[in-house]
């Protein structure tokens, strides 16, 4: 019985980590895509500006993702542990349950922090190549960056379709639509000069 409960806890923990990875990775993709489209409309020709913007955004999302997930998960798990202590009438000091509160919270926080950092970095790579003179900024680096964003959205959508045991194509389309809405709104703001 204890083994089954432990296996269930691992599965539940894995699902939480997976959910955080997709959720915050999605944020990273759409945020940097919005920056790229806005800069494209403004015809920003200096790749350094996009590299700095992408890096700053990635770091902000990473720190936010890490701290937000850690504090939230730690609070949830500490509350669960207190309920468990109360029901078992034990302080459970030094138990595996007590250890897992910090370990699992930290792991989920790392997953949540790395996800947007990785996605933002991949979308920013074309601007690095432009900075090094390998490709043109206008319009090659922009189009490749936006293409990488679309590919990542399709990968995430396919992953979600696989998890839900539903159509990978439909989930990928939903993710792409979110990307197109982000691009469209960013374009409108760029054209309006906001």
Image (spheres, rainbow, N blue to C red):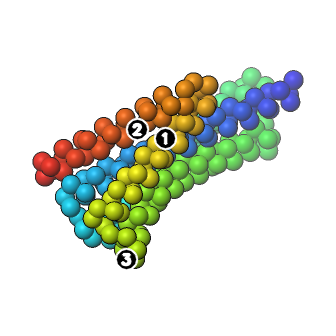
Q: Position of residue 70 (x, y in %)?
A: 56, 46
Residue under the image location 39 percent in, 57 percent down: 144
The part of the image, by quadrant, that contains residue 136 is bottom left
Q: In this view, does 55 lie to the left or right of 66?
A: left
Compared with 93, 120 (above or below) is below
Task: Name the secondary structure under disc 1.
Answer: helix
Among the two numbered marks 2 and 1 on one chain, the one whose residue lies closer to the N terminus:
1
User: Given contact means CB atoms under 8 Å apart, are the residues at marks 2 and 1 in contact?
Assistant: yes
Task: Name the secondary structure under disc 3.
Answer: loop
The part of the image, by quadrant, that contains residue 179 is top left
Compared with 1, 128 (above or below) is below
User: Given the current orientation, which residue lies at the most extreme left position?
Assistant: 192
Task: Judge whether residue 105 can be spotted in this image.
Answer: yes
Give the labeled residue for mark 1: 154
Closer to us: 74 or 90: 74
Residue under the image location 72 percent in, 28 percent down: 84
Disc 2: CA contacts within 10 A as few (<14), some (14-19) or many (>=20): many
Closer to us: 97 or 167: 167
Q: Where is residue 167 in the image (x, y as percent from the top left)?
A: 55, 26
User: Given contact means CB atoms under 8 Å apart, are the residues at marks 3 and 1 in contact?
Assistant: no
- Estimate the spatial distance between the alpha carbons at disc 3 and disc 1, rounded to whole Å: 29 Å
Disc 3: CA contacts within 10 A as few (<14), some (14-19) or many (>=20): few
Give the labeled residue for mark 3: 133
Residue under the image location 34 percent in, 56 percent down: 143
Give the labeled residue for mark 2: 176
Q: In this view, does 160 lie to the left or right of 193?
A: right
- Estimate the spatial distance between the alpha carbons at disc 2 and disc 3, rounded to whole Å: 30 Å
Among the two numbered marks 2 and 3 on one chain, the one whose residue lies closer to the N terminus:
3
Among the two numbered marks 3 and 1 on one chain, the one whose residue lies closer to the N terminus:
3
Q: Position of residue 129 (x, y in %)?
A: 41, 70
């Amino acid at each position: 019985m204890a083994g089954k409960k432990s296996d269930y806890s691992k599965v539940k923990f894995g699902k939480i980590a997976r959910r955080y990875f997709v959720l915050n990775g999605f944020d990273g993709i759409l945020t940097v895509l919005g920056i790229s489209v806005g800069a494209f409309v403004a015809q920003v020709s200096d790749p350094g500006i996009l590299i700095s913007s992408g890096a700053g955004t990635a770091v902000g999302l990473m720190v936010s993702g890490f701290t937000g997930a850690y504090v939230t998960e730690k609070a949830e798990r500490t509350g669960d542990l207190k309920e468990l202590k109360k029901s078992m009438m034990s302080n459970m000091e030094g138990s595996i349950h007590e250890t897992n509160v910090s370990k699992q919270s930290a792991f989920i926080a790392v997953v949540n922090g790395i996800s947007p950092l990785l996605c933002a970095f991949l979308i920013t790579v074309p601007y690095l190549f432009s900075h090094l003179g390998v490709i043109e900024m206008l319009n090659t680096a922009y189009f490749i960056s936006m293409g990488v964003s679309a590919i990542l959205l399709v990968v995430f959508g396919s992953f979600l379709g696989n998890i839900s045991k539903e159509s990978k194509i439909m989930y990928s389309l939903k993710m792409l639509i979110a990307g197109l809405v982000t691009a469209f709104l960013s374009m409108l703001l760029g054209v309006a000069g906001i």
